[in-house]
Structures are given as C-alpha cells and as structure tokens.
Amino acid sequence: MTKQTSFFQSISRLYPHMKPILPRLFLGLLCALLASVVALAIPQVLRVLVNESLQPGGATESVLMASLTILVLGIAEAGLVALRRQFVINPATTVETRMRTSLYHHLQDLPVAFHDRWGSGQLLSRAMTDLNFLRRWMAFGAIMLVVTTLTVVIGVVVMFTMSWQLALIFLGAALPIMIYGFRFRTSFSKVTRQSQDQAGDLATTVEESVHGIRVLKAFGRSREALENFNEQAEVLRQTEIAKAKHQATFTMVVTLLPELALGAGLVVGVMLAASGELGIGALVAFFATAAVVAAPVEFSGMLLAMALTAKTAVDRHFEVMDSVNTITTPESPRKPQEVKGALTFNTASFAFEDAPEHPILRGISLEVRPGETLALVGITGSGKSAMLQLVPRLYDVTDGSITIDGVDLRDFDVEELRRVVGMAFEDTTLFSSSVRDNVLLGAAERTEELLHESLDVAQAHFAYSLPDGVDTLIGEEGLSLSGGQRQRIALARAIAAKPKVLVLDDPLSALDVHTEELVEARLREVLAETTTLIVAHRPSTVALADRVALLEDGRITAVGTHTELLAANDHYRYVIANLVAEPRDLDSELSELDAEAEEMSR
C-alpha cells in the first residue's frame, strides 16, 4: 500500500494528465461560477422590486421589468449550466481514456512477479471503476466544489452588506459544520478506501468463479462458491452502509444547522424590520440570498464525499503506476551478430522476491547446444517451470547469469529477446479471438502459409473443421475447446513465432502418445535449427529428446542421454518410474474412430 497523503498531495498527481485540458476546465468553471453569480443576482432584483415597485403608487411597468429581468437571469443561468457541461465532458472523458490506456500499458510492462501478488479483480476495479469515478469528479465534482465554496463566500459577503446581525447568525452555523467536517473527512476516507478494496476483491471472486465454472460444476461446489461470494458481498454491503451513514450524518448536520440559523434569523429579522433598522426589501433579499447560499451548503456533503472518494481512487491508481518494472532493457542493449541459439546457464540461482531466503534454483549450470532438444525432468516442486520462465525473462535470475550465444539475457532488448525465445505453457492461455489471431499472435509476418504450417506441425487440423474454420472465435480463454485442442493451438502459436530458442513447459501433456509422436516428428523437421528446452512429464517425451537434464531440489545433478541416465542414476530411474501415465486424448480417439468408420463405409 502507498503511504498516507493529504488530499491535495494526492489530487496534485493528476496535474500532468489534466494539464492539456485545463483551459477547457477553466472555461467550465467560469460558466459554473457565472451561473452562481446570476443566481445570487436574482434576490437583489427582488429587493428593488419590494422596495420600489410594490410600494403604494408603484408603477406597473416596474413590476413587469423586474419579472422580465428575473426571467432573463433564469435563462442565462440555465444556459451557463449547459455550457459548463459542453466545456468539460469531452476533455474529462479524454483524460479518463488516456489514464486507462496508460494503466493498461504499464500492466503489460510490469513483471510476472507483480501479477503474482495482485488479484485480477483489484486491477480491473482500478482500470474501470476508479477511473470512471475520477472522470465524473473532474467533470463535475471538482468544479462544483470550487463553485460551491465561492458561492458561499460571495453570498455571505452580500448578506453582510444587507444586515451584519443576520449574517453573523447565519455564519455562526458554519463553525460546528467545519469542526464536524474534519472528523467526517478522516472517517469517510477510511471507509471509502475499505469499500473500494472490498469491491476489487469481490470482482476477483467473480472472475475466478466464471473462469472456473466447469470445476465448480464438476465437483458440485456451486453452493459453497455462492456462500463464499455471499459472505464477501455482505461484508461489502455493511461497508457501504457504514459509508452511507457517515455521509447521511454529515448531510443532516450541514442541512439542519443552516435551517436553524435561518429560523433564528427570521425572528431577529422581523424584530429589526419592526424597529426600522432593516427595510422590508432588504429582509426579503437577505432570505432569498440565504436560500441560494443554503443550497450549496447542503450540497457540500455530497461534494466532499466525492472529493474524498476521488482521492482514494487516485491513490489506488498510482499504487499500480508507482510499481517499478524490474525487467527492463539496458541503455545499450546487445545482440549476437548471428543468433544460433546456444543457451547456457552459468551458476544461475533464483528466489522469489518475498522469499529470498528460500531459493528455488541453486547454482544451475547447463548448456543447451544450438539445434538440440533437451528434456528437463524432476519430481514435482524441483523447479522445472521456474527454470524455463527465466529464459524469456519472465523472471530474472537472482544470482549467476543465463546467456544466448554468449550474451547475457539482461543485456538484450526485452522485446528482441522475446522474439528470439518462444514459449508454450502447460496451463494454456488463449484469447477471446479467432484461431488465426491466437496462432499468429507472436508472428512477424501473418501469412496463410505460416498459419497452415504451424497448425500442421502442432497437429491442430481440427481448426479447419470448426464452424468458421480458422476464423472461428474460440471464446474466453479458449474454454470452448478441449484441453488437448487448446494445447495444440498454443504450441502452434509458439511455432509460428519462429524462435531460435523454444521453451516448452510440458505443452503436450493432454495429447495421446500417437499425436505426441506426430507433433515431435514435425517439430524436428520444421525446427531443426531451433534450440528446444522442454519440461517432460512422460517417458515418451523424454525418449524423444537428444539429451536429458535431471533437476533435483533446485540443482542439476545429472545430464546425459535417456539411456545413459537410466543405466547410471538411481534418482533418474525413480523419476522416470513415477512419471504420469500416458493420458487419453479423447479428441484424437474420436478422430481415429471417425476415420475408421469412414474407412469401413468405403
């Protein structure tokens, strides 16, 4: 969390974003202020009307003129309010869009370690709800807060010119409002932050439940998920009620005290008028002015609540924007003259930021030759996936180094490195787009030939039989496809990027042996010059590799061919014996059955 800041310290951070639209905001403020001045001018017309036109023998024309003047002032006030909206709405939405785009860009740059710590709902609420509220505050709340303050100040000054005794009574109500206002600001700020954070947590729960709906249904846990969601929703409801109570109490105070002051002022005003110290016209104008001033005073509760909520939104926004990207490009990036793909781990170690005392990898030394396929095996938790994620710099080593053709990964331009290194994950992530867009996501040239070749290598021919072929929208995260289909699309995506180094985190785990063999055979053909580092969880995958590295408790303890390690290493034999059994890929089995049926029909 960010440190506690004052309201003005927080809001001042919006200045760089608001600077381009300040002229338009100033014009909107000017229109709102003029509308307020026009509203304050109407009581003065009433004073003249009462003092001159409504006296015995007063001219009818004066009454008509006063009525016409009030009508013109009313129309002018309405026009100024409309102008205010025209001036501020468009630039405020522009700032909102730019801040949202900037936040999204920063999220793309931030390392995976940041996303490991943050719930997606928290980030979503900051990108959508908080920025939407900031836009409304910039377009309305900020301007009206300034106008309300100036209206009250100008109104009180005018009231003093008419009757200082009545003005003092009205001003006396302001002191307790100011005292309570300080208390309200502290308590409301706290509960507002709590509310917005809880809303973010609730959004995370919704997203997780939607993405995991198949799991919840399969295990019959929908009721438990609902109960958990209901508990979180109830906590948020109670916080919102507490928030509403704070605002309601403040609104009651700022409404009741001015009304009591007006009641007391009316008694004193009548006494002053009866004694001749105050004219009837001045008395009417005073209370008309007081009514104009009382409205923004009563409105101040909502405006102050908006301002405090805006402060919280700014703080939450910059919590993310202030997060430092540790995976950066050096000032003078390096690159081999010709990338061959020699991947070398030089006593590389890695530990997560929040647990530096518990390294996952310890002094890894390993060389993967250009064009070689090296399988990485080990028991669960030995650090295989972490080791692979160091290659495209999803994480950085905490000690030692990793090089490609002798150049440290940290000396590469980050974007260039991720063009050199392609990766496919075991937990497949696809995007809510077409098969074509998913496969060609990282491709330099989006050609039909590349698309078809990549799908063929990954044995993803099923894509052509989808309703719209390769242009079929596959739904959110590709969940309309089976696990094996998603893995093949993800593998095709990695192949289409044409990397020099291909890192595969067991991307064939959902495929049957036959399909895996076809994929491996085609991979050898198409990526003959590509260095491949693959995490293997099945003996068939291990046997197809040129060499195997055994990872044990974060260390490489043996390297050799599958046959050599079987003969010489007890732990390797233990790992191989406990690798998961070959899975059944129902997609492939159904395809085979269809083929057999078609053959029999002939």
Image (cartoon, rainbow, N blue to C red):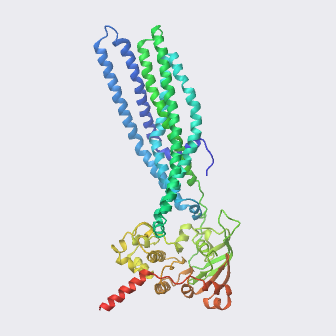
Q: What is the tally of numbered marks visible in this picture?
A: 0
Residue 140: image quadrant is top left
Is residue 82 visible from the viewing direction of this image?
yes
Above-or-below relation of 51 to 595: above
> Which image quadrant: the C terminus?
bottom left
Q: Is residue 573 above or below residue 202?
A: below
Q: Is residue 491 left or right of residue 50?
A: right
Q: Residue furthest right?
A: 357
Q: Is residue 494 left or right of residue 595?
A: right
- In this orientation, which residue lies closer to the viewer: 432 or 529? 432
Residue 482: image location, x then y, percent: 43, 75
Instruction: For residue 153, say whether it is visible.
Output: no
Examine the image and state in which quarter residue 24 appears.
top left
Residue 423, position in %: x, y?
Answer: 53, 74
Q: Is residue 398 left or right of residue 122?
A: right
18 over 460 or under it: above or below: above
Closer-to-camera residue (369/572): 572
Going 41% across and 14% down the picture, which residue do you hit?
281
Q: Residue at x 31, y 7 (%)?
A: 57
Q: Point out residue 433 in the picture as x, y percentages from the top left corner.
A: 40, 67
Q: Position of residue 147 (x, y in %)?
A: 47, 32
Observer-nearest of 503 and 506:
506
- Front residue (pair 494, 169): 169
**Image position of 414 with respect to 61: above or below:** below
